[in-house]
Structures are given as structure tokens and as C-alpha cells.
Image (tube, grey):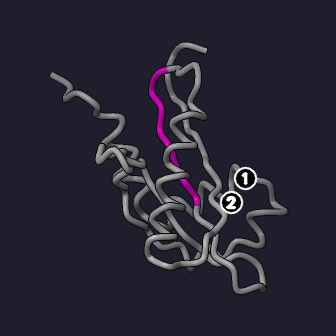
Amino acid sequence: MIPKHIHDRFFKEAFSRPEVAADFIRAYLPASFSEQLKTETLTRQQDSHIDDELSQHYVDLLFSAQFGNDPIVIALLFEHKSYPEEYPHFQLMRYLQNYWSNQLKEKQKLCLVIPIVIYHGQAK
């Protein structure tokens, strides 16, 4: 019997490796972006954030990395979907809001977050 959510587990195990995430970025994101992203600085970030209602929301994978020659950090949010979702942007916005709220609480400078949705389901 195949365990439930085997695709989620595979995705997390594979993409949690910075070199796999870097290969994906180089292969699928525009060259104008990926050439400036210093993939050797990819660092895995915390996977969950607690919002004001104290409910926990899990981010599939979140990395930070240096970008270009400027001292900025961007975060890449990898979200895995195995089923079609009509409004995935609402879930992504909640992740972004929780991430930025956490940065503000920690007195950190807000960084740009680029959400990347990877879908492998059968339905279009």
C-alpha cells in the first residue's frame, strides 16, 4: 500500500536539498533572474509560522538567498500541489503575511518573497 501524501514527502525530501532547489531555479526561472541569484547562498528557512489566531500554517519549503551584487536577501517559497486549487493565491498570501509579520516581530528587514507553485496533478 502506498502511504498517504507520498508525493508531499518526496517533494520535501528532494527540494529541501539546496542543490536540487538551485538546479530547479536554473532550469525553470528566467535567466535574467537565476543568473543574479547566488544559489551557493541558498539557506533553508523555518517551515511554519503561527498567525494571530494561533493556527499553524505550513509552508512547503522556504529558502533565502543573496541576489545580485547588492546586499539584499530574497526568499523563495516553493509550494507543492498535487490537486487543482481554485484560489491558491489566498494560501500564498497568508504564507507571505505570516512570514513578513514574523520578520517585523524579530525586528528584521523585510525581504522580497517569490512564490513558486509546483503542480503535478492529473487535472488541468
Question: In the image, is residue 81 above or below residue 11?
Answer: above
For the C terminus, which image quadrant?
Answer: top right
Of residue 112 and residue 120, the one placed in the foreground of this image is 112
Task: Report the residue at 37% width, 50% height from top.
Answer: 52
Q: Is residue 72 left or right of residue 53?
A: right
Kindly give the residue lying farthest to the left in the view shown.
1
Callout 1: 10 Å neighbours few (<14), some, many (20+)? few
Front of the two marks 2 and 1: 1
Of residue 85 and residue 30, the one placed in the foreground of this image is 85
Callout 2: 10 Å neighbours few (<14), some, many (20+)? some
**Tag 2, which secondary structure?**
helix
Question: In the image, is residue 47 above or below residue 5?
Answer: below
Q: Is residue 52 left or right of residue 121?
A: left
The kind of residue tagged 2 is Arg
Residue 63 counted in the magenta span: no
Task: Report the residue at 73% width, 64% height from top.
Answer: 34
Give the number of callouts: 2
The kind of residue tagged 1 is Leu
The image shows residue 105 at horizontal and vertical percentages of: 44, 71
Give the magenta-colored segment's residue range. Answer: 76-83
Question: In the image, is residue 63 above or below residue 53?
Answer: below
**Tag 1, which secondary structure?**
loop
Question: Is mark 2 in CB contact (under 8 Å) with mark 1?
Answer: yes
Q: Residue 6: which quarter of the image? A: top left
